[in-house]
Amino acid sequence: PCADCAALRYWLNLFPDGSFFLSTLYEGRSTEPAYDLGAWAVASDRGTLVLQGGREAPLRFRIVDAGTLRLRGQDGRDIESKLNYALARQPQFEPMEPRLTMRGMYHRKGGAGVFTECLTQQRWPIAPSEANAALVRAYGDARRATSDELLASVEGEVRQLPKADGKALPTLVVRQFIGVWPGETCGVRF
């Protein structure tokens, strides 16, 4: 349910490494979803899935069964309503291609850029692009040693791009370079 739109549509990818991608579409208000990514964990009560991403507060879902999650309120308790707050597991995994501003540790390896996103700790190769060229230049200007990783911020999209063997590989496509911060790190993941 949505107070100021037709409906909220959630699409959630949970990865075995404890990271997630989340898409939220406000039907009737927007044609483009809002994306979030971060780390997930099962709370100590073993009945709550907690998503800690780029939002100010974590999202919480009650684990109903192996195929159903139910959104909980900001206070962490069940939402008392007959409206549908459930997410249903799909029969087959459908990878998401989120587009958003990301921060991560950037370095060059074998002539190619690699980006380790701060919230998920997922590591992606970077596709060639004009915006990526700006990141490469800033990295070259700011690094102190050939092995330095730098904290970088980009507007980008994680795309499933084919490798030489034909299998898809999550790859960061940089749409806009924002900046690099020498000496800074991602900090601690929850």
Image: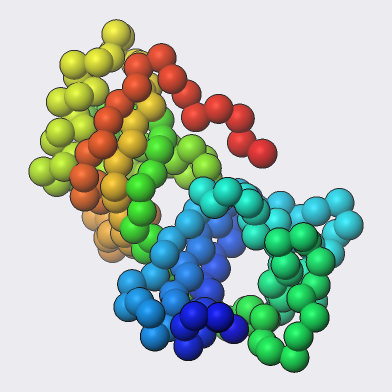
Q: Nearer the viewer, residue 155 or 143?
A: 155
Residue at 51% x, 85% y is 7
Q: Quadrant of residue 137?
A: top left
Horizontal side of residue 72 vs 185, given as left or right: right
Horizontal side of residue 164 vs 81, given as left or right: left
Q: Is residue 158 above or below residue 190?
A: below
Q: Nearer the viewer, residue 5 or 16?
A: 5
Residue at 69% x, 72% y is 71
Q: Is residue 122 above or below residue 138?
A: below
Residue 88, given in percent of the width and then of the height, sits at 64, 82
Q: Quadrant of the N terminus?
A: bottom right
Q: Quadrant of residue 28?
A: bottom left
Count of all numbered marks drawn on residues in the image: 0
Seen from this angle, which residue lies furthest front?
Answer: 4
Residue 134, given in percent of the width and then of the height, sits at 15, 33
Q: Is residue 93 visible?
A: no
Residue 166, given in percent of the width and then of the height, sits at 28, 63
Q: Nearer the viewer, residue 148 or 48?
A: 48
Horizontal side of residue 183 vs 136, given as left or right: right
Residue at 48% x, 44% y is 122
Q: Nearer the viewer, residue 19 or 151?
A: 151
Image coloring type: rainbow
Q: Quadrant of the C terminus?
A: top right
Residue at 72% x, 75% y is 70
Seen from this angle, which residue lies furthest bottom?
Answer: 82
Q: Is residue 92 above or below residue 33?
A: below
Q: Is residue 126 visible?
A: yes
Seen from this angle, which residue lies furthest left?
Answer: 130
Seen from this angle, which residue lies furthest top?
Answer: 144
